[in-house]
Image (cartoon, rainbow, N blue to C red):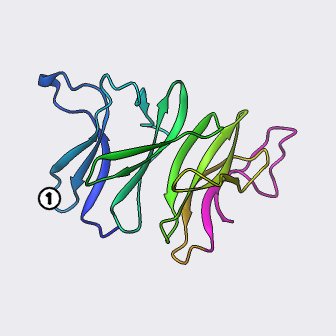
């Protein structure tokens, strides 16, 4: 949140056999890697970090990071204390989980969730309780982000007046608020 650190996905050194994609913490000022946050190689908790479909999200105070991975064949949400390397798994009754975004007060996460091939927006408390579905329709709802005051969520969607789900005709993606 202060712009000094970034979380990113990358492999390690090929000379050490580090060919799998891991989650890293780096300095946004120098570009140097600070530490590996998740080593996915041979860790059954991290079958796959969601490389193409998701991003991680820092908590407002910068102490925690939310990210997604695949665990036992399903997408799951993780909340990690960056200093202590303490990771908490949040299993959800969804097939897909992507794009977590912290609320400005640090108490909730908004994310895109997939159930039955339909992607909607959801909220969950950081401790994994109080799962709530925000949207519920045939449109794709992706990449939620909170407004600074926490009253609005902005997201990408294929909804619009020219959308016709019966004909599978959808407009270009657009940004809307909830």
Residue labelled with disc 1 = 30
Q: Which residues are magenta?
A: 151-178
Q: Is residue 120 magenta?
A: no
Question: In x, y percent, where is residue 62?
Answer: 34, 64
Quarter of the image that includes the N terminus: bottom left
Question: In x, y percent, where is residue 7?
Answer: 31, 51
Question: In x, y percent, where is residue 130?
Answer: 65, 55
In the picture, measured across the screen, residue 82 lies left or right of residue 18, that is right
Q: Indicate whether 84 appears above or below 153.
A: above
In the picture, measured across the screen, residue 65 lies left or right of residue 169, that is left
User: Residue at the bottom extreme?
Assistant: 149
| Residue occupying image coordinates x 38% and y 54% | 65
Question: In x, y percent, where is residue 109?
Answer: 54, 57
Q: Determine the image quadrant of residue 118.
A: top right
| Residue occupying image coordinates x 85% and y 38% | 167
Which residue is nearer to you in this view: 92 or 18? 92
| Residue occupying image coordinates x 57% and y 73% | 150
Q: Is residue 155 magenta?
A: yes
Q: Indicate whether 174 appears above or below 77.
A: below
| Residue occupying image coordinates x 63% and y 44% | 113
Quarter of the image that includes the C terminus: bottom right
User: Residue at the right extreme?
Assistant: 166
């Amino acid at each position: 949140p202060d712009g000094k650190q970034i979380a990113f996905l990358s492999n390690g050194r090929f000379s050490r056999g580090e060919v799998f994609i891991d989650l890293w913490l780096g300095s946004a000022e120098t570009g140097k890697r600070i530490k590996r946050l998740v080593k996915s190689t041979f860790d059954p908790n991290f079958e796959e970090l969601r490389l193409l479909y998701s991003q991680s999200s820092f908590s407002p105070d910068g102490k925690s990071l939310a990210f997604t991975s695949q665990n036992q064949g399903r997408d799951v949400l993780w909340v990690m204390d960056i200093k202590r390397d303490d990771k908490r798994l949040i299993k959800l009754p969804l097939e897909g989980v992507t794009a977590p975004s912290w609320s400005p007060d640090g108490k909730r996460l908004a994310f895109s969730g997939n159930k039955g091939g339909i992607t909607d927006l959801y909220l969950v408390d950081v401790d994994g309780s109080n799962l709530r579905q925000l949207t519920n329709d045939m449109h794709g709802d992706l990449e939620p982000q909170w407004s600074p005051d926490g009253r609005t969520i902005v997201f990408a969607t294929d909804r619009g007046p020219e959308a016709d789900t019966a004909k599978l005709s959808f407009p270009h993606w657009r940004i809307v608020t909830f």
